[in-house]
Image: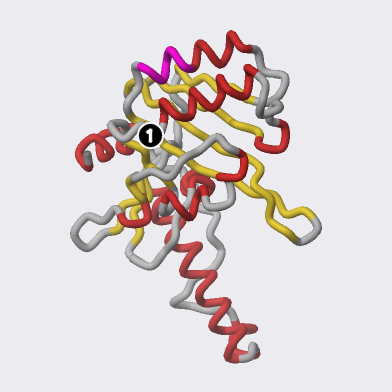
Amino acid sequence: MSTLTRNSSNPPPYFYNLSPQQQKNWMKTTRRMEKNEQLRAEYPPFQSPSNFTILHLHQYSSIETVEELIMKARTTHKYTIDTESQVINKVAKCALVQIQLIHSIHKSTLILIEMFYLPNQNSLLFKKIKELCSIIFRDENTKITWGPFDNEFKNFHSYGLFEKDNSIDLNDCGNDNEDRRLTILGLFVCDDLSFVYSEQLAIKYNASIDEVYHSYLEYL
């Protein structure tokens, strides 16, 4: 059921008492809400795959866990990748790397590498995590990122885990007059080609996972 209470074609009386900038902001927000409602009507709610594993990697991870991931990575050739930063004392610090190993349409593994809590670089555990990353970032693998690879990882190279690589940038993935944003959680169709998309917005727009993979395979 729709929860939209605004209508860009019929603004409320107080709208006309707002300043020009406030009216512009109100209309922009309202149209975005209307677009969201349209998407909710067009696409079914997101359903998480039944076989979806999430693993955290940090200084307390076991060697066995990383070795199991290395074995999975050796037989996986499609990945989605995203990075997150955390603002500390008004400075953005590299905090998290999210890597999804896509084994099949209905099965995947999500690795969350906690950058603040990595093991010592001289430890065997760190070397194993680095080996895992080197396998994932091989040239022959397909890596889909939420922006240009260099931008995603420009502040992460100091950790010693990642090398520069070529990848598919979702913000450059277009289809005729539509801008189709593939995500690990859904497919978002946007009419504004300048709109920057992210994994977080995939959750917000509640798109369908099935169409993601079908469109993803067609795109490849």
The boundaries of the magenta stretch are 70-74
Where is residue 40 drawn, in percent x and y? Answer: 43, 48
Residue sitting nearer the eye, 216 or 121: 121
At label 1, the amino acid type is Ile
Q: Position of residue 129 (x, y in %)?
A: 56, 24
Residue at (29, 53) in percent of width and height: 173
Q: Residue 161: horizontal and vertical position, in percent?
A: 55, 35
- Disc 1 element: helix
Q: Quadrant of residue 160?
A: top right
Name the residue at the top extreme: 64
Q: Quadrant of the C terminus?
A: top left
Residue drawn where x is 62% and y is 83% of the image: 22
Q: How many numbered tags mark residues here?
A: 1
Q: In which image quadrant can residue 87 be found?
A: bottom right
**Is 117 covered by the magenta stretch?**
no
Left or right of residue 184: residue 200 = right
Instruction: Using residue 168 as the reference point, say whether residue 129 is left or right of it.
Output: right
Return the residue nearer the eye: 216 or 134: 134
Q: Residues within 10 Å of mark 1 (few under 14, many from 20)?
A: many
Q: Nearer the viewer, residue 185 or 72?
A: 72
Seen at 38% across and 26% down, the residue is 102
Please say if 99 is above or below 155.
Answer: above
Horizontal and vertical percent for residue 131?
Answer: 49, 23
Coloring basis for residues: secondary structure
Magenta stretch: dominant secondary structure: helix
Please tell me which residue is depicted at 38% across the width and 67% down the height of the picture: 194
The front one of 219 and 58 is 58
Report whether 214 appears left or right of 101.
left
**Label 1: which residue?**
209
Furthest toward the front, the residue is 122
